[in-house]
Image (spheres, grey):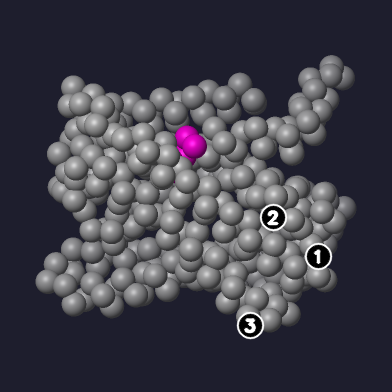
Amino acid sequence: MRGRYLLLALLGLALGLAIPALLGGRALGPVLAQIRLWHLLALLGLIVLAWNLNAGRLRLLLGGIDGRRITQRQALGVVMASEFAISATPGGAGGPVTYAYLLRRHGLPVPQGLALYTIDQLLDMLFFLMALLAFAVYDLWLPEGARLAWQILLLIGLLLCGAGVVVAIVRRYRRFVLFAGRGLRRLGIRPSTRRKLMRRLLEYRQGLLRIRHYSPWRLMAVYGLCAGHWLLRYSVLYFAIREVGGRVDWLHAFLVQMISLSLGHAILLPGGSGGAEASATLLLLPWLDPGRLAGAILIWRFVTFYWYLIAGAPVFLVLVGRNLWSHWRADEVPS
């Protein structure tokens, strides 16, 4: 199983590098040669700042649960390890598991940790929904507004669907449990296992309901940190395009990243590698020549994907790796 996962990860990395290399061809070398080191370091600094904003968000969310405390350094470790797990696993599936596991070490039960992760994701959805609505209003005033309208409407629909599923779990809990129970029974899951899963689901719902006890000021502060994080992270492509001599509106670069990363994760390769590069290429090719576009994509993916792996791997190994290695070794013991 681990061999298959490693093969999948290598395939994703190979596709992620091959697409811009094939796109740029011989023109890619001169474009990469003109990239200034200080500019690249500044972009990496934006990501570090974004991680710290996320760490502050985690501290505020956790502080709203029975006054639990966590230092900025500890919260930053949780954020970096979780971001590494998201980037290194298909569809980002390792992110919530790592997040909940590390919060359990700070006294928060796993179901509540997963609920806190969901609250965090709901605030992300709210930010993107508000941003897209603002973009839609702004875009209507532009002559070329119809060009982006379908992209904005598609993303709004996807975000509303995701938020709607969580709201349905919270508000229509009984129906959801009955539906899930029937599904598990048809899959042949044992009654004891089904009861255990239902108890976990109840704890998860109770954790989601904790958001009602947060003060408006706390939620506003969390939302502000959320907005700051995404504005920094989604400005990387815009600055990367400018560094290679291209010109694209910040709004368009923002939307391209949202669409590309969503489609990339849908193909279930680690970090959306391959899919993100391919979709960004298709969306930006009308505005940039192949050489500049390939260089911009390499900068963008290095800062928002490879840097997450490089910087997050040591943190993940320190915080999670020992326990994970113990489980792997246990799996290898012959029965």
Magenta segment main secondary structure: helix
Residue placed farthest to the left in the image?
143
| Tag of residue 68 | 1
| Percent position of residue 92, x then y | 56, 45
Report x, y in % for residue 209.
72, 75
Residue 40 placement: quadrant: top left
Q: What span is in magenta?
A: 303-307
Q: Secondary structure at mark 3?
A: helix
Q: Amino acid at mark 3?
A: Pro
Q: Residue at x 84, y 19 (%)?
A: 333
Q: Separation of disc 3 and disc 1 at Cα?
A: 18 Å
Q: Is residue 155 visible?
A: yes
Q: Which residue is disc 3 drawn over?
A: 216
**Magenta stretch holds residue 306:** yes
Q: Is residue 251 above or below residue 13?
A: below
Disc 2 element: helix
Q: Earlier in the sequence, mark 3 or mark 2?
A: 2
Callout 1: SS: loop
Q: CA distance from mark 2 to mark 1?
A: 13 Å
Q: Position of residue 83 (x, y in %)?
A: 58, 45
Circle 2 residue: 72
50 to the left or right of 202: left
